[in-house]
């Protein structure tokens, strides 16, 4: 475990975020808050209720990244990828009992940047997560690569589905622990 204090590393949190791909455990102390990182999970200390998760899927023009912050009462997500990650829209899914009386559904609110379709994959992801964890899920999305062909679009959609499943597995394993 590596400890780094705010005195020896000004701006520790941004530097920590850049090092998320490092598989070593790191602890950074910044103003009496300890951040621990292990694998794809960044745990804030016991004084904070936030947990941050990060995954990536695919390669090159079709690579996508998902970052989720578990606030304790919902998830805030960032879904980006391709050659030009950006903000293309925001989706909010709130779980509710199914109108058919079986299981759960969700109400979904979408705000796309005009001309952007990024919210479509974010919508599916937010709906699935909200219905499974029974908490509100907000995802800001922005995936772009110029001149994608249909196979590449299919690969991006498949990568997003894989990220959704990886997130569910991680979230369920944390709640069981």
Image (cartoon, helix red, strand yellow):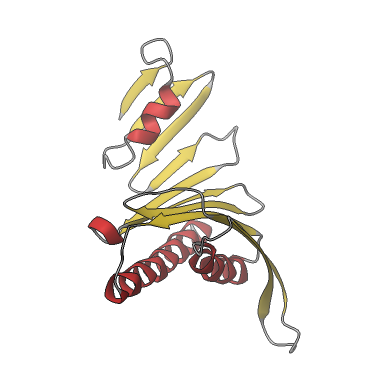
Question: Residue 60: x and y, percent?
Answer: 23, 56
Which quarter shows the N terminus? Answer: top left
Q: Which image quadrant is residue 107 in?
A: bottom right
Residue for point 53% across, 71% down = 124
78 on left or right of 65: right
Camera-side residue: 148 or 138?
Answer: 148
Camera-side residue: 107 or 41?
Answer: 107
Camera-side residue: 101 or 2?
Answer: 101
Above or below residue 176? Residue 103 is below
Question: Residue 177: x and y, percent?
Answer: 48, 57
Residue for point 47% across, 65% down = 168
148 on left or right of 111: left
Q: Which image quadrant is residue 66 in?
A: bottom left
Residue for point 45% across, 32% down = 35
Tally of numbered tags? 0
Above or below residue 95? Residue 86 is above
Camera-side residue: 147 or 21?
Answer: 147
73 on left or right of 20: right
Outermost residue toward the left in this view: 60
Question: Residue 120: x and y, percent?
Answer: 52, 68
Above or below residue 9? Residue 175 is below
Question: Residue 138: x and y, percent?
Answer: 61, 56
């Amino acid at each position: 475990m590596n400890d780094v204090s705010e005195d020896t590393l000004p701006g520790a949190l941004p530097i920590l975020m850049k090092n998320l791909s490092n598989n070593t455990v790191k602890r950074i102390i910044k103003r009496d808050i300890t951040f621990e990182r292990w694998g794809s999970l960044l745990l804030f200390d016991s004084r904070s209720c936030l947990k941050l998760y990060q995954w990536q899927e695919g390669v090159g023009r079709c690579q996508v990244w998902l970052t989720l912050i578990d606030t304790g009462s919902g998830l805030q997500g960032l879904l980006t990828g391709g050659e030009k990650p950006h903000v293309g829209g925001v989706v909010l899914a709130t779980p509710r009992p199914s109108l058919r009386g079986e299981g759960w559904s969700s109400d979904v609110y979408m705000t796309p940047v005009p001309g952007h379709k990024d919210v479509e994959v974010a919508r599916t992801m937010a709906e699935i997560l909200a219905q499974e964890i029974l908490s509100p899920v907000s995802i800001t999305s922005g995936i772009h690569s110029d001149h994608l062909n249909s196979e590449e679009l299919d690969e991006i959609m498949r990568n997003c589905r894989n990220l959704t499943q990886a997130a569910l597995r991680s979230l369920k394993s944390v709640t069981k622990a």
